[in-house]
Image (cartoon, helix red, strand yellow):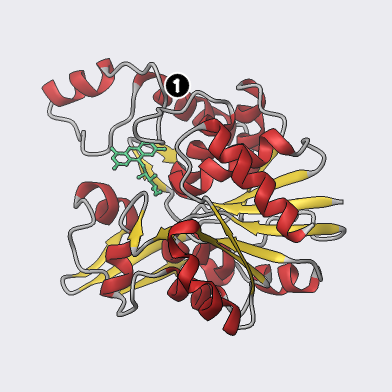
């Protein structure tokens, strides 16, 4: 029996590490968002895959959650002097992973196989499965037109108003056949940004139906605590999408898929409203500052649905 964890971004990766500390590699599989991916310097950048990989390998930069700890920036510094693009910060060690991924692609590997090879190289034993090996690219609709996700998120620091998100290529992306939908004990939707980290995963044709027909609990952990997103611009996006930045709105967003929902202690008063939507609801500390917080939340989420 297997637990499937859907994740993207820094927030989701925190719970992912907690889950990986609790469940063995043959009990837990990660499905990761690839909508943030883009080509840069001739390299395939896959931020959510790499954030999860570095987090599970426990080499992630603790301050940012993305990129590596103990990083050096000689390439970026030299690029700057040579007039190259440095808006997207790629450290020297991180670049090595990207160069290796480029070589694995040149050998004919897809993203799933390359990700497994890189994860293996970093000592990770849990399976990290991109939602699809086909390109899906999140586009942000703004009053000034469409923006590629990393241009919106990093280059423009999420300042443009987000009117809507589109996932270019999703309609023709093939669901990763390696995802084990049979004999699932539970699906965990990690506390990632619902709009740009989880929705792209659910936009892959067949993903929602496969999750629902697994016939197991689907538990979402709220990334919103007390009306503010812990990491990243989730609350700003929600306001710009015209929804209140509340855990209740996240529950509504997941209502068509989730069966269970975890609210933070700060939002305990929202529990009844979430339950009134028809979701089994529990309260836990969803703000994860330490490794113990990650493990404790993972245990609480699993105890809630298993
Ligand atoms: N986020 C930033 O805000 N600034 C960066 O320069 C940056 C570089 C970067 C490099 C590799 C990587 O895997 C992630 C990186 N991120 C950066 C984070 C990334 O943009 C986001 O984590 C995801 O795209 C959304 O969660």
Q: Taking 72 as reference, is 16 left or right?
A: right
* Picture quarter with ligand 1: top left
Nearer the observer, 5 or 40 = 5
Nearer the observer, 103 or 177 = 177
Q: Residue at x 24, y 24 (%)?
A: 76
The answer to whether 295 is drawn above or below residue 282 in the figure is above
Q: Quadrant of the C terminus?
A: bottom right
Nearer the observer, 93 or 187 = 187
The answer to whether 32 is drawn above or below residue 19 in the figure is below
Residue 35 position within the rendered picture, expressed as x and y whole percent measured from the top left: 46, 56
The residue furthest front is 269
Q: Residue at x 44, y 75 (%)?
A: 249
Q: Residues within 10 Å of mark 1 (few under 14, many from 20)?
A: few
Q: Does the Cβ of the disc 1 residue fall within 8 Å of ligand 1?
A: no
- Say which element carries label 1: helix
Q: Taking 137 as reference, is 15 left or right?
A: right
Q: Is residue 110 visible?
A: no
Nearer the observer, 25 or 75 = 25
Q: Residue at x 51, y 56 (%)?
A: 135
* Residue bearing the label numbered 1: 96
Q: How many marks can you see?
A: 1
Residue 152 position within the rendered picture, expressed as x and y whole percent measured from the top left: 26, 56
The answer to whether 55 is drawn above or below residue 207 in the figure is above
Residue 242 position within the rendered picture, expressed as x and y whole percent measured from the top left: 30, 80
Residue 142 position within the rendered picture, expressed as x and y whole percent measured from the top left: 22, 71
Q: Residue at x 37, y 37 (%)?
A: 42
Rendered image quadrant of residue 41: top left
Q: Is residue 151 visible?
A: yes
């Amino acid at each position: 029996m297997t637990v499937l964890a859907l994740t993207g971004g820094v927030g989701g990766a925190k719970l992912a590490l907690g889950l990986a500390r609790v469940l063995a590699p043959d009990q837990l599989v990660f499905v990761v968002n690839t909508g943030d991916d883009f080509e840069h310097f001739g390299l395939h950048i896959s931020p959510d895959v790499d954030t999860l990989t570095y987090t599970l390998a426990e080499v992630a930069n603790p301050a940012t959650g993305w990129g590596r700890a103990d990083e050096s920036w000689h390439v970026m510094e030299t690029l700057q002097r040579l007039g190259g693009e440095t808006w997207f910060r790629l450290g020297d060690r991180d670049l090595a992973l990207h160069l290796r991924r480029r070589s694995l692609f040149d050998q004919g590997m897809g993203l799933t196989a390359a990700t497994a090879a890189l994860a293996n190289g970093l000592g990770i034993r849990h399976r990290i499965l991109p939602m699809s090996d086909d390109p899906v690219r999140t586009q942000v609709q703004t009053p000034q037109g469409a923006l590629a996700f990393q241009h919106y998120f990093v280059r423009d620091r999420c300042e443009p108003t987000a009117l809507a998100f589109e996932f270019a290529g999703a309609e023709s992306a093939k669901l990763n056949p390696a995802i084990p939908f049979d004999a699932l004990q539970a699906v965990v939707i990690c506390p990632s940004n619902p709009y740009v980290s989880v929705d792209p995963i659910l936009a892959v044709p067949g993903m929602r139906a496969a999750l629902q027909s697994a016939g197991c609990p689907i538990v979402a952990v709220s990334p919103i605590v007390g009306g503010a997103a812990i990491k990243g611009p989730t609350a700003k996006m929600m306001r710009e999408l015209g929804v209140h930045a509340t855990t209740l709105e996240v529950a509504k967003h997941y209502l068509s898929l989730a069966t269970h929902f975890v609210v933070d202690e700060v939002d305990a008063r929202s529990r009844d409203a979430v339950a009134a939507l028809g979701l089994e609801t529990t309260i836990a500390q969803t703000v994860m500052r330490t490794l113990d917080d990650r493990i404790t939340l993972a245990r609480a989420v699993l105890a809630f649905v298993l």
